[in-house]
Amino acid sequence: MGKDKLRKFAEIDTFSNVYQMEEGKVLKGKWASEHFKNDNPIVLELACGKGEYALNLARMFPQKNFIGIDLKGNRIWRGARTGIDEGITNLAFLRIQIEDSVDYFVQDEVDEIWITFPDPQPQESREKKRLTYPGFLNKYKQFLKLDGRINLKTDNDGLFQYTVEKVEELGLSCYKKTDQLYKSEFYDDLLSIKTHYERIYLKHDKSINYIQFSLDKL
């Protein structure tokens, strides 16, 4: 591991807005009251990387709490560092495997989920690793409110079509769906947030897909 990665791993150990593995479990059911010190809605960004979406959402919506989840601490460092430097108190990060998220939140603790440009896991043998695989959806259902919505934003047409198919197969409510986000009626300030990778995709004329659905009938 390079010196820069080691430095970042050491630093996030000292960050007040980052929780790693076991230390995050003590906040299960208490994120709003004990970390954020309020009763505002909680929104998750899964596979958050550098936390660009969670960070910008926290800036835009101070009346909500945002938690970015990822396993790679050297990436989380960037969003967490910016959050501390800017004094953003409605932003936190959790360094865990996403499949373990049920160990960190209780029923109805989360109001909304964002999945922004995740690894599409295109190989058929890796279907169970896709963050919209039914196994993952069943995990999210354990802590997402009944009317809570899941937002997927991706450049990968395969993952988008896979998700659309699963939403239809499971009979889930779908509120928004487009394979041309920036030309659609859904485009707004919320969806205009662009991650580092999204900017790269757009430079190469990649279409951005977006779907919003709930787990109400799962």
Image (spheres, helix red, strand yellow):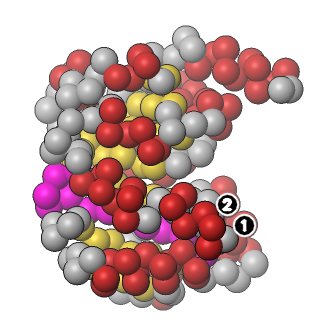
Q: Secondary structure at mark 2?
A: helix
Question: For the residue marked with disc 2, what is the amino acid?
Answer: Tyr
Q: Which mark is residue 200?
A: 1
Say whether residue 155 is magenta. Answer: yes
User: For the residues marked 2 and 1, what is the alpha-carbon distance in whole angstroms?
Assistant: 5 Å
Question: For the residue marked with disc 1, what is the amino acid?
Answer: Ile
Judge from the rendering whether residue 5 lies leftward or rightward of residue 212; answer left or right: right
Q: From the image, tell me which residue sits under label 2.
A: 197
Bounds of the magenta segment: 144-156
Residue 113: x and y, percent? 34, 54
Residue 132: x and y, percent? 43, 65
Residue at x 54% of width, y 58% of height: 129
Q: Nearer the viewer, residue 80 or 56?
A: 80
Say whether residue 197 is magenta. Answer: no
Residue 150: x and y, percent? 32, 62
Q: What main secondary structure does the magenta stretch of the protein show?
A: strand
**Quadrant in which the N terminus is drawn:** top right
Q: Decide: is 166 above or below 6.
A: below
Residue at x 69% of width, y 23% of height: 8
Q: Secondary structure at mark 1?
A: helix
Q: Which mark is residue 116?
A: none
